[in-house]
Structures are given as structure tokens and as C-alpha cells.
Amino acid sequence: MNTREEFELKAATVDMNIERLTKERDLLAKEVDSLRTELAKASGKLPREGARVRLVHMGSDPQPVPDGTCGTVSFVDDIGNIHMEWDNGRTLALIPGEDLYKYL
């Protein structure tokens, strides 16, 4: 095997390892997110179904719910998004850490 072939073989091996490690990282990140959500629910940091919330400001959504709108929590999903039924008829989720809100 010449030097170029050796280099290409090593590069292919590195690429395969990067792909494998990326998949493993993504799986672990999902598991960590799920565990964080469970912990937050258990500790009372995430609202329960039926809780009332007032939106202070919605982060980067292109069609945000207006500031000051109140709503009722429908459910909290596996990654911690708080799905809402807003009093104005919208059903857009809150994203903790990005959207600002207060419990009523």
C-alpha cells in the first residue's frame, strides 16, 4: 500500500468513527434531556397539567403569542416543552430557558 492509499484508509476510518460517535452523542443527549425533564417534573420546576400561566415574552418564535396572554398547561412533553392552550385560542408550546412566563 502506498502512502496515499494509507492516508485515504485512515481518513475513511476517522470519518466512520466520527459518524459513530456523533450518533452515540445524540442518543445520550436525548437520554439526558429526558432525565432532566423527569427530574424537573418531580421537583415541581415544570408545571402540571391544568396550571395557569401568564406569558411575559416569547423568545424567537416567528409568530409568537402576544406578551401578557394567559393560558392553561395541556401537558409537558419528553423534552420539557410546555404545551399550552392560550386564552386567545392558540396552542403554541412554551420553551423553558427561551420563553419567559409566570405561574398564576
Image: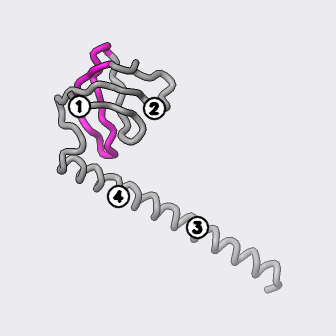
Compared with residue 13, is residue 91 higher up or lower down, i.e. above or below?
above
Q: Amino acid at mark 1?
A: Tyr
* Residue contact at pointers 1 and 4, CB within 8 angstroms: no
Residue 99 lies in quadrant: top left
Gap in angstroms between the C-alphas marked 3 and 1? 43 Å
- In 3D space, how far apart are the residues under numbered discs 4 and 3 (Cα atoms)? 21 Å
Q: Which residue is mark 4?
A: 32
Q: Is residue 61 left or right of residue 48?
A: right
Q: CA distance from mark 4 to mark 2?
A: 23 Å
Q: Quadrant of the C terminus?
A: top left
The boundaries of the magenta stretch are 69-89
First in sequence: mark 4 or mark 2? Answer: 4
Towards the viewer: 97 or 1: 97
Q: Residue at x 34, y 19 (%)?
A: 68
Identify the residue shown where x is 82% and y is 78%.
Answer: 4
Whether 25 is among the magenta residues is no
- Quadrant location, the N terminus: bottom right
Q: Are marks 4 and 2 in contact (CB under 8 Å)?
A: no
